[in-house]
Image (cartoon, rainbow, N blue to C red):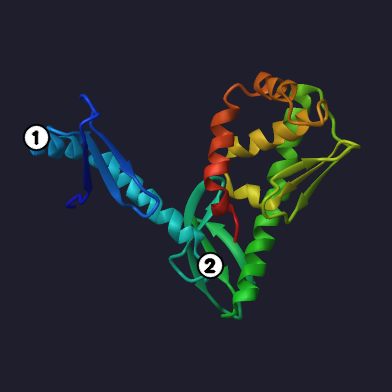
Amino acid sequence: MDIKYSLKRSKKRKKTISLQIGSHSDITVYAPYFTPVAEISRFVEEKRNWIERTLRNQSRQMSVLKEKTYETGEEFYYLGRPYPLKAGFDPLENTGVLFRLDRFMLNCPDNGEMKKYYFTLWYQKKAKEHIPARVAHFSRELNLWPRGVRITSARSRWGSCSQDNSLAFSFRLIMAPPQVIDYVVVHELMHMRQKNHSSKFWRLVIEAMPDFTEHRRWLRKHQEMLKF
C-alpha cells in the first residue's frame, strides 16, 4: 500500500517528526523545515504497521456507525469484538438470532424492523445473563448490595443508581468489552456510597478498580458503536 500524506514543515520544530491521522483517514506529517525528504519517507515507512492498523480500525468504526441493514457480511459487536452476520430466511427454522462459530446467524424475513427487533431481543437476553452476574460478583467483593438490577433500552446512559440504590444498565453495554462492563458496574455500585461525581467518588472507584480510566476512555471513544 502506497501511503499518501500531507507534509507540513515548520521552522519552529527543532528535531522531531510526528504523524497524525485525522477522522477522515487523512494523514499529516509534521517535520522541521530542513528535514530531508528521504528521512521523512523513512519515518513514514517505520510507522507503516501502525498507520495501516489505525486506518483499518477507522474503516471498521465508520462501517459500524452507518445505519444497519442486517445483511450478510455486516459486523455486530459482542463483548468488545466485531463478528460478521449471515442473514437469510428459512420458514422451517426458528426465527431469530443465533451466535455460533464466531458469527451471528439471523433467520428472519426481509424486513428491517423485524431484523432489528430480533437483534435487540438477543442482546437484551445476553445482557440479562451477563450484567446481573457481574453486579453480584462485585457486590460480594465490595460488600455493596443493591435493591435490584434492571436492564434497560437506554441509548446513551450506560448505567444509573437511584436514590434507593436500585441499579439499571443499558442492554447495549453487552457490546462492550467485559472489562468495560465491569467498570460501569463498579461505577454504579460506588454511587451507593457517593451519589455524585465528586473527587471522593472517584477515589472510591479507583480503590476498587485502579485501571478504570482506561475502560472509561474506551467507552467514551466507542460509545457510538454501541448504538443501533
How many residues crowd around disc 2 within 10 Å: few (fewer than 14), some, or many (20 or more)?
some
Residue ID for mark 2: 68
Total numbered circles? 2
Residue at position x 65%, y 74% in the image = 114
Task: Determine the secondary structure under disc 2.
Answer: loop
Disc 1 residue type? Pro
Percent coordinates x, y for residue 204 in the rendering: 72, 21
Secondary structure found at label 1: loop
Q: Residue furthest front?
A: 11
Nearer-the-camera pick, 199 or 15: 15
Q: Is the residue 152 above or below the residue 221 in the image?
A: below
Q: Say which amino acid is labelled 2.
A: Lys
Task: Give x and y (percent) for residue 209.
Answer: 64, 24
In the displayed structure image, the side of residue 166 where residue 184 appears, left or right: left
Residue at 66% in and 62% down: 120
Q: Which mark is residue 192?
A: none
Residue underneath mark 1: 36
